[in-house]
Amino acid sequence: MRILISLLFLVSTTSSISQTRDEISKSAGDLYDKEEYSAALGDYAKGLTLYPDDREFLLMKGNCLDRMSEVSDAYEAFSYLIQKYPAYSIGYNQRGLLLLRVQEFEMALKDMDKAVALAETDSVRLSAFLNRGAVKFQTRDFVGTNNDLTEALKIDSLNLGVMNNLAIVSKELGNAEKAFFY
């Protein structure tokens, strides 16, 4: 009887200590929102021990490492995410942004091209076009930037950021009238 009671106590204690996937996600997300990236990374790592291939946890692990300026580790985390989920456009987008920040423009553009091609929703597509346009702008491909921003404007015609960027690009292309329009 003592063994049965001890076993029941152990089971009830273990279940009250372990967290569900949603609880881990919320806890880590709250820490991330407070810009406590190291603590959030710890929670996401804990989540990955329980759910090793969880797409959100893998993405957020990379985001935390990126925010902590752990460039190599963040790159590896995003690359692993892409390996596990090759049709997930946000993984390419995030790795592309990382590559843009470290001025690896050619590699960033390849990731952004993939992000645009795989985008499933308008919000993800909008982000992908904006980010690919940013890469093209950095390489002084103003025609390509204009094309991407025009596509973004088709998705969200009231986006002031897109219009402001189109004004800058139009000026760079020598089209003052269009720049004034935007």
Image (cartoon, grey):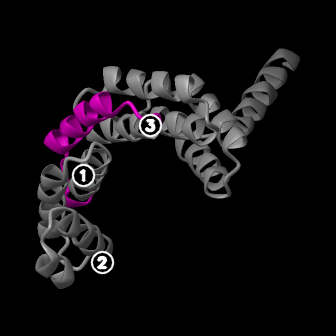
CB under 8 Å between callouts 3 and 2? no
Q: In which image quadrant can residue 4 be found?
A: top right
* Disc ID at residue 98: 3
Callout 3: SS: helix
Callout 1: SS: helix
Q: Nearer the viewer, residue 133 or 39?
A: 133
Q: Residues within 10 Å of mark 3 (few under 14, many from 20)?
A: many
Marks 3/2: CA distance? Answer: 25 Å
* Disc ID at residue 160: 2
Q: Is residue 116 magenta?
A: yes
Say above or below: 6 vs 156: above
User: In the current view of this chain or complex, which residue is farthest to the front?
Assistant: 174
Where residue 128 appears, as percent x and y from the top left, is 25, 50
Q: Residues within 10 Å of mark 1 (few under 14, many from 20)?
A: many
Q: Is residue 45 left or right of residue 129?
A: right
Magenta extent: 102-123
Dot 3 or dot 2, earlier in sequence: 3
Residue on which the image places disc 1? 133
Rendered residue at 44%/31% (across/down): 54
Q: Is residue 45 left or right of residue 101?
A: right
Q: Residues within 10 Å of mark 2 (few under 14, many from 20)?
A: few
The kind of residue tagged 2 is Leu
